[in-house]
Amino acid sequence: MVLNDAAEEGASLPRRGGEAAAERGRPEAVRPDLPEFDRLEQTVRRLLEAGAEGRARARAAEHRRQELQEALDAVRTGSLDPHELSERVGRLEAENQALRQRLRSAEALAQRIHARLQLLEDER
């Protein structure tokens, strides 16, 4: 289908007007400027965009499915220990919490330094 091929290649529909009509070998008078044509064009464009977005989501989902299948296979064969993974996740979550706290402290310190600098500058 022509519309599907254009959408997959990332091409867009040609714009209406003399240039696009001339490129198609038809005079502009063949396509009158009617609101119905505008709505139809907009609808087709939205459908093509939605189709492209759907294909992108499907590719991402397939990639994620493949990653999960590989992880499941690794657990089945014993190359990954689920208990060890669970413990590692717990350690990483605790580390993330500590890092978040350090970041909050650093942000508070930076704000205090900024306020002091502003005060010094205002006093000049």
Image: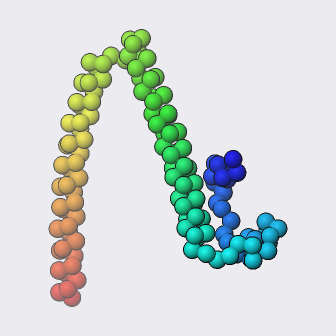
* Quadrant of res 21: bottom right
In the displayed orientation, state which residue is furthest to the bottom.
Answer: 124
Answer yes or no: is residue 9 visible: no
Vertical order, 117 against 63 (above or below):
below
User: In the image, residue 14 lies at what x, y percent?
Assistant: 68, 65
Vertical order, 112 against 84 (above or below):
below
Vertical order, 60 against 103 (above or below):
above
In the displayed orientation, state which residue is furthest to the right.
Answer: 25
> Who's the residue at 48% across and 43% down the image?
57
In the displayed orientation, state which residue is furthest to the top.
Answer: 77
User: In the image, residue 43 lies at what x, y percent?
Assistant: 54, 61
- Frontmost residue, 12 versus 67: 12
- Frontmost residue, 3 versus 113: 3
Image-based side of 122 in relation to 63, left or right: left
> Who's the residue at 38% across and 16% down the image?
75
> Who's the residue at 33% across and 16% down the image?
81
User: In the image, residue 118 lies at what x, y percent?
Assistant: 21, 79
Image-based side of 9 in relation to 83, left or right: right
Answer yes or no: is residue 39 visible: yes
User: In the image, residue 17 lies at what x, y percent?
Assistant: 70, 75
> Who's the residue at 27% across and 30% down the image?
89
- Frontmost residue, 23 versus 59: 23
Image-based side of 46 in relation to 9, left or right: left
Image-based side of 31 in relation to 120, left or right: right
* Quadrant of res 36: bottom right
